[in-house]
């Protein structure tokens, strides 16, 4: 009797009596039943404890070191009004053949970056069954937050190469995944929210379509350019200068430039003495690269301004410095900064960026890789939302 008590505690099911446990073909089969008690008739409301008959039902449960099956001996009660009904329990929903905790554990496993086939095999169900349980999860955006962030990612799902992700960067929460990045569809999506007037800040990369969406749907919101994408422009310009200067050099000098991209992008305060000597040698060979490197460091100081009032003059001085230098590789960079001048200044007044949204996109890449891609957009959307909750 003591052993059965321990087994009952191990099974962790309320008011369950274990009558037998056996191991068959490396599967654990546990025979259980519930204590007899009075039940209220669902037809007339009378109380009865008369047993009409018994039925055996095999139920899948969470694995206990091996695949586990519960053999439930169910009672069917009889009421004086003629109604027959089964006894109630807390672990098996009506018309189900798996326990509630097994379904809950399967759904919870979808928060991990693993394919549905692995989740199904772990709980002795098929991948299709696991996905059917997971489809019980559904997340819908009720209202938009004060700070909204929008980005695109390569999803290859739902027949579209690129999908869109909407995030609340202030509370670090993924709000929704959209099937494409088309401007008209984004406007249509945001226009259905009555709370769109509450959005005060709209953070995005330097995509003109996203800016048009913000101006159309959130006319009162401040559009903020993501700092990473802003800084990336000057990095690209400096890299173009490095490649052009390297291609002009003979082989005996070109070796000093080999694999120097990360060295040029590293902050000056993190350089060692040997690395600074290597940079000095490169700048002596290619003076134009020295100018590009100086412009890169000066722009980092500009973007780190404590406010837009402080950064406005710094940015104007930096743009003037680029214009007086013979660096045509910076033309695209300065053009982008002129087009996004106000959005860059606004990014200096707020702490929000697309950093969190880029982290979510990296997690999505891992999910796509382990699942070998997901063509069904609805399943792909739910997996992304659930993995980032």
Image (tube, helix red, strand yellow):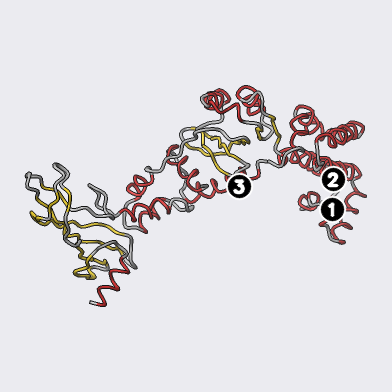
Q: Nearer the viewer, mark 3 or mark 1?
A: 3
Q: Which mark is residue 268?
A: 1
Q: Closer to the camera, 13 or 164?
A: 13
Kindly identify the residue that appears in the image at 26 percent across and 77 percent down.
Answer: 2
Left-right relation of 381 to 133: right
Rendered position, 185 above or below 259: above
Task: Kindly indicate the quadrant of the structure image that contains residue 206.
Answer: top right
Q: Are dots 1 and 2 in contact, CB under 8 Å?
A: yes
Q: Closer to the camera, 66 or 4?
A: 4
Kindly identify the residue that appears in the image at 75 percent across and 33 percent down.
Answer: 346
Rendered position, 60 above or below 341: below
Task: Kindly indicate the quadrant of the structure image that contains residue 56.
Answer: bottom left
Left-right relation of 182 to 63: right
The mark that comes first in sequence, 3 or 1, is 1
Residue corresponding to mark 3: 359
The mark that comes first in sequence, 3 or 2, is 2
Q: Which mark is residue 254?
A: none
Residue farthest along the bottom direction in this orientation: 2
Left-right relation of 282 to 192: right
Provide the secondary structure element on which disc 2 rests.
helix
**Residue 126 locus on image (x, y percent):** 32, 51
Q: Nearer the viewer, mark 3 or mark 2?
A: 3
Rendered position, 258 above or below 385: below
**Residue 18 locus on image (x, y percent):** 22, 68
Provide the secondary structure element on which disc 1 rests.
helix
Kindly identify the residue that appears in the image at 88 percent across and 33 percent down.
Answer: 313
Residue corresponding to mark 2: 297
Image quarter (top left, top right, bottom left or bottom right) of the N terminus: bottom left
Residue farthest along the front direction in this orientation: 46
The mark that comes first in sequence, 1 or 2, is 1
**Separation of marks 3 and 2 at Cα, in angstroms:** 26 Å
Left-right relation of 359 to 33: right
């Amino acid at each position: 009797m003591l052993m059965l008590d321990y087994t009952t505690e191990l099974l962790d099911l309320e008011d369950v009596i274990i009558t037998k446990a056996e191991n068959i073909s490396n599967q654990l089969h546990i025979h259980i039943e519930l204590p007899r008690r009075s039940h209220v008739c669902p037809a007339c409301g009378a109380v009865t404890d008369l047993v009409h008959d018994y039925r055996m039902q095999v139920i899948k449960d969470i694995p206990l070191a091996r695949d586990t099956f519960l053999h439930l001996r169910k009672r069917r009660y009889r009421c004086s009004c003629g109604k027959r009904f089964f006894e109630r329990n807390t672990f098996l929903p009506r018309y189900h053949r798996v326990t509630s905790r097994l379904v809950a554990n399967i759904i919870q496993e979808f928060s991990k970056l693993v394919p549905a086939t692995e989740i199904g095999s772990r709980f002795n169900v098929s991948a299709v069954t696991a996905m059917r349980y997971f489809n019980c999860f559904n997340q819908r955006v009720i209202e938009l937050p004060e700070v909204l962030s929008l980005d695109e990612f390569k999803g290859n799902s739902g027949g579209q190469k690129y999908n869109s992700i909407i995030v609340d960067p202030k509370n670090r929460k993924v709000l929704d995944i959209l099937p494409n990045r088309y401007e008209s569809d984004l406007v249509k999506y945001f226009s259905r929210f009555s709370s769109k007037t509450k959005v005060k800040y709209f953070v995005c990369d330097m995509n003109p379509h996203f800016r048009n969406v913000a101006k159309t749907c959130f006319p009162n919101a401040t559009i903020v350019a993501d700092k990473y994408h802003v800084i990336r422009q000057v990095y690209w310009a400096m890299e173009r200068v490095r490649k052009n200067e390297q291609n002009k050099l003979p082989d005996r000098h070109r070796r000093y430039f080999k694999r120097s991209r990360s060295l040029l992008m590293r902050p000056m305060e993190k350089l060692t003495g040997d690395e600074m000597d290597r940079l000095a040698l490169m700048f002596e060979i290619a003076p134009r690269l020295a100018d590009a490197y100086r412009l890169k460091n000066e722009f980092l100081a500009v973007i780190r301004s404590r406010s837009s009032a402080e950064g406005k003059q710094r940015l104007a001085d930096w743009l003037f410095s680029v214009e007086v230098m013979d660096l045509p590789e910076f033309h695209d960079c300065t053009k982008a900064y002129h087009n996004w001048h106000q959005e860059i200044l606004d990014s200096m007044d707020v702490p929000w960026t697309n950093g969190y949204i880029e982290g979510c996109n990296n997690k999505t890449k891992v999910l796509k890789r382990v699942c070998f891609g997901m063509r069904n957009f609805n399943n792909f959307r739910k997996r992304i939302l659930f993995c980032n909750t």
